[in-house]
Image (tube, grey):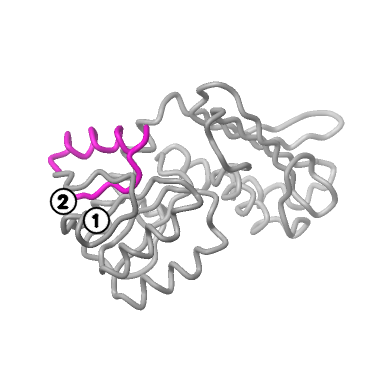
Amino acid sequence: MKIALVGYGKMGKIIDGIATSRGHEVVARLNETPAAENLNNPDVVIEFSQPEVAFNNIKTCLENKIPVVCGTTGWLHQKPEIENIAKENGTAFLYGSNFSLGVNLFFALNEKLADLMKNFSEYNIQLEEIHHTHKKDAPSGTAISIAEGIIKNNPNFNAWKLHETEKNQLGIFAIREDEVPGTHSVYYRSEVDEIEIKHTAFNRNGFALGAVIAAEWVRGKVGVFSMNDVLGL
């Protein structure tokens, strides 16, 4: 498979190595805006760039009828428009706030626990995410996905917010520490005990491998997808 990498920072370089090791050809490594001329006719684009340029990067690729796997967070207010562009151009768009297999299993566990706990109001719910100091968006896209999973299964909440949980707004503490790949925790605290679920990434390799697997899966498909589709969750 021919893969174009749009966004060639730390993640792009790791994806490059994993894609090559799995027998794929990386035909473009771009930090500039993609165009038909510099994408070099790939089968799939993997986009890990920055929030301020992600929309235009993805839009250009989809309008050239190239499927896109995107892991950039912090731009999701424009995601519905991108989904429409993918459908209009008869190609595929797959977004993941986190491509790690473990995190996607964590998402499923989080929703199950939220459903179990929805009737126990004595427990206060709080989210926490820790990332490296280079991360520009806060909270992380993964933390937002976790919060949305709880909100979907617990009628006591209708939105999320930064910092502490207040009434019907689910709180997310966003902490930045040197070189932390990503740690996400959900706490259910009462006066007598606490239930915690937690995912800790040791490095970026799991994210990169998941992105390549998603690219392998999405090739030749038409529509809007997520890692749930890739993993059958």
Instruction: Name the residue at the bottom extreme.
Output: 88
Displayed quadrant of residue 190: top right
Residue name at image x 30 percent, y 56 percent: 34
Rendering coords of residue 60 (x, y %): 33, 64
Residue name at image x 39 percent, y 72 percent: 85
Out of 55 and 43, give the one closest to the viewer: 55
Is residue 59 highlighted in magenta? no
Rendering coords of residue 115 (x, y %): 66, 52
Residue 21 drawn above or below residue 202: below
Out of 136 and 208, give the one closest to the viewer: 136
Is residue 3 highlighted in magenta? yes
Name the side, left or right, on which 4 lies relative to 153.
left
Q: Give the residue number, with chain letter if any, for mark 1.
A: 44
Out of 99 and 230, give the one closest to the viewer: 99
Number of numbered discs on residues: 2
| Kind of residue at badge 1 | Val
Q: Give the residue number, with chain letter if any, for mark 2.
A: 2
Q: On residue 230, which mark appears? A: none
Residue name at image x 87 percent, y 31 percent: 191
The residue range painted magenta reads: 1-24
Rendering coords of residue 24 (x, y %): 15, 44
| Kind of residue at badge 2 | Lys
Q: CA distance from mark 2 to mark 1?
A: 7 Å
